[in-house]
Amino acid sequence: MTEPYRDTSVSVERSKSEITAALREGGASGVQFEELWGDEPTILVRFIWHSMTVRFKAQPLPAIKGPRGGWKIAPEQRERQAWRGLAWYLESLVKAATFGIVPFEAVFLAYFEDAHGKTIGEHVIPMLEEGKLARPAIGGTS
């Protein structure tokens, strides 16, 4: 299976524009894009919707060196790929919430950001992984 958006030629700016348009059409009251560079580049998209701050974080896949020292997959391509995936993902989530397929809170709950900049998912997922929140499946062990 090939990686989604691996060969995209869509610019980062166009993906950001599409994210902005989808959020605006869906009722968001603002959006902020942030890029953290370094050993593990990170992309952050924050937006305000229904007085709540929602944050998505993505890390581009690592670039791949070619056999002769050039790039097989350049860092810039990985950045375009990550932004493209975010654009499509956010657009589909906004549409699901807007059309009432899934309630807004259910769509974005894991991404609501608290006053300390941590999402609900960042609080809850480690507890789920440790078995502290969910009951075992029927017939499972406790």
Image (cartoon, grey):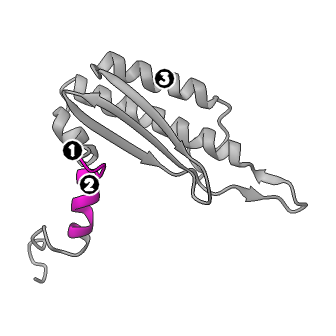
Q: Give x and y (percent) for residue 47.
A: 34, 31
Residue 25 in magenta stretch: no
Left or right: 72 in relation to 86: right
Instruction: Confirm or deny contact between disc 1 and disc 3 (CB under 8 A).
Output: no
SS assignment for the magenta stretch, majority: helix
Q: Give the residues in magenta.
A: 115-128
* Secondary structure of the residue carrying numbered label 1: helix
Which quadrant of the view contains residue 122? bottom left
Q: Say the numbered circle drawn on residue 54.
A: none
Q: Residue at x 58, y 24 (%)?
A: 14
For the residue pair 65 and 40, the one nearer the viewer reads as 40
Res. 102 visible in picture = no
The numbered mark, 1 or 3, whose residue comes first in the sequence reads 3
The numbered mark, 3 or 2, whose residue comes first in the sequence reads 3
Residue identifier under label 2: 121
Q: Say the numbered circle drawn on residue 18.
A: 3
| Distance of label 1 from label 3 (alpha carbons) | 22 Å
| Distance of label 2 from label 1 (alpha carbons) | 8 Å
